[in-house]
Image (spheres, rainbow, N blue to C red):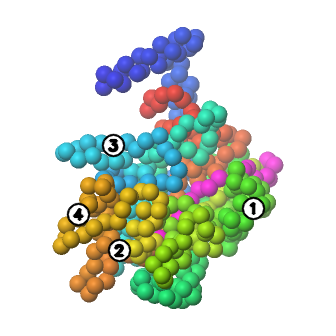
Amino acid sequence: MAFIGEDLFHFQASLVQSGSSFEEFVKKNYVEKWVNENLYSAMNIRTSFVVAIHDFLAREGLINLERVLMSPVTDPLAHDVEHVPTIHYKGMPYVSTHSMIYSKFLACFNPRVKGIFVDSPNIRLEIESPQRKQRGKYLIDFSQIDIELRRNRGIGLEEYKDSPDKVKAILKEDYERVIDFFERLIIAATSAIAERNENDLKALGVALEPPRQPFPRVKHTEALKKYGKADLETKAGNDIPSQFYWVTGLLRENYDLIYPYLLPDGSRLPLTSFESDMIYNYDICAKSLIRDTNKFSPALEIMSGAIREWLYEAIIFRLIDNRIIPEAPVFNNGVLENIAVLDGYGPFLTAVAMHDCDGKPYFPETMGGGIGVERSLYALLKGPKIEKIDDITCFGKNPDSYPIFLF
């Protein structure tokens, strides 16, 4: 606590030197926001959004999972963060949760589980904008409704390698099923807001119309050629007259399915050679609709997900190719001989490698995604009254907002 007090002492001194005061900073950046009618309306809408999603998932037969805030391993992420916070407890280092992706997989081991959901805590110490520009999509701690569904297809390694047409047909069927699932979820959530929060939407100067299926889709590789890499989602959204749309097939996380990846001769395709049709993932993007002008704001990605890698061999090679682990696990009579070099992945990969008494792997075939709660609210509510993501949170910590966070 002494370090906190010392940091606050220096922060207060810098405020005084600039002609302000500590009290003025707390009032302007926190108290005035807490008593603001805009935040009250946003919190009402948040309540409808989260409750509607939870109700939808429960009706679909999914099971609620407990939060995992720290673990020996967390999502490595495909983008850079400042560092991963580490907590030492009982002689063991634990890292804070980037996302609950690995926990979701393990929670789906039981074949009776149709799927799981959890209002997941996420701590990602995002790097500050080099231009010192407030980027609306980042919070260093945020809520994500994590969802994972079992596929139960029973495809083994031989079939994966030798029957590509059959496997592709099954993957396409499952892909359409999960796209339909998330579209129905978004329709349920937006319908609840439209029904319960019309006065709040009016107060914020935005409108919301529940979308109809199917949502428009944009393939990432095609959008890349047309719009370039910078602000691709926003540029694509400018050409789509819909409040919600998909961007599909973007190479990203190590657990998002690429097929084919392992080839019949034992080799694998390099990660630079994949087109969107071979990458079974998807993002939902959303825009706000400004009530006075009837125009959309720039789009923002609010959910990402995928069909997941499910074969042990593919999982291991993806981790190696992404330089997350240096080598494959080596098991000898239940002993993980190279456990030291696998870092926190040792326990996870031990579970992934296990088979039941019939020789079937425990590790499930799944598909799923994570919906950013604050990011969704910001995407749908930004307009005359909501300018930045801080405006829809009581304690939001955007890395570009302040030099120090007080609450």
Q: Where is residue 41 in the image (x, y as percent from the top left)?
A: 59, 45
Amino acid at pointer 4: Glu
Residue under label 3, please give it.
Answer: 86
Q: Label 3 neighbourhood size at 10 Å, few (<14), some (14-19), many (20+)? A: some
Would you say residue 294 sits in the magenta stretch?
Answer: yes
Q: Label 2 neighbourhood size at 10 Å, few (<14), some (14-19), many (20+)? A: many
N-term-proximal mark, 4 vs 3: 3
Q: Residue at x 51, y 46 (%)?
A: 80
Amino acid at pointer 2: Phe
Q: Which of marks 2 and 4 is in front?
A: 4
User: Residue 42 shows which numbered tag?
Assistant: none
N-term-proximal mark, 2 vs 3: 3
Residue under label 1, please give it.
Answer: 225
Query: Separation of disc 1 and disc 4 at Cα?
Result: 46 Å
Q: Which of marks 1 and 3 is in front?
A: 1
Residue under label 4, please give it.
Answer: 337
Q: What stretch is highlighted in magenta?
A: 292-308
Would you say residue 316 sits in the magenta stretch?
Answer: no
Q: Position of residue 107 (x, y in %)?
A: 34, 68
Query: Separation of disc 1 and disc 3 at Cα?
Result: 40 Å
Q: Residue at x 65, y 53 (%)?
A: 300
Residue under label 2, please give it.
Answer: 363
Question: Tags 1 and 4 in contact by the CB under 8 Å rule?
Answer: no
Q: Where is residue 239 in the image (x, y as percent from the top left)?
A: 79, 60
Residue 104 falls in which quadrant of the image? Answer: bottom left
N-term-proximal mark, 1 vs 4: 1
Amino acid at pointer 1: Lys
Residue 350 falls in which quadrant of the image? Answer: bottom left
N-term-proximal mark, 1 vs 3: 3
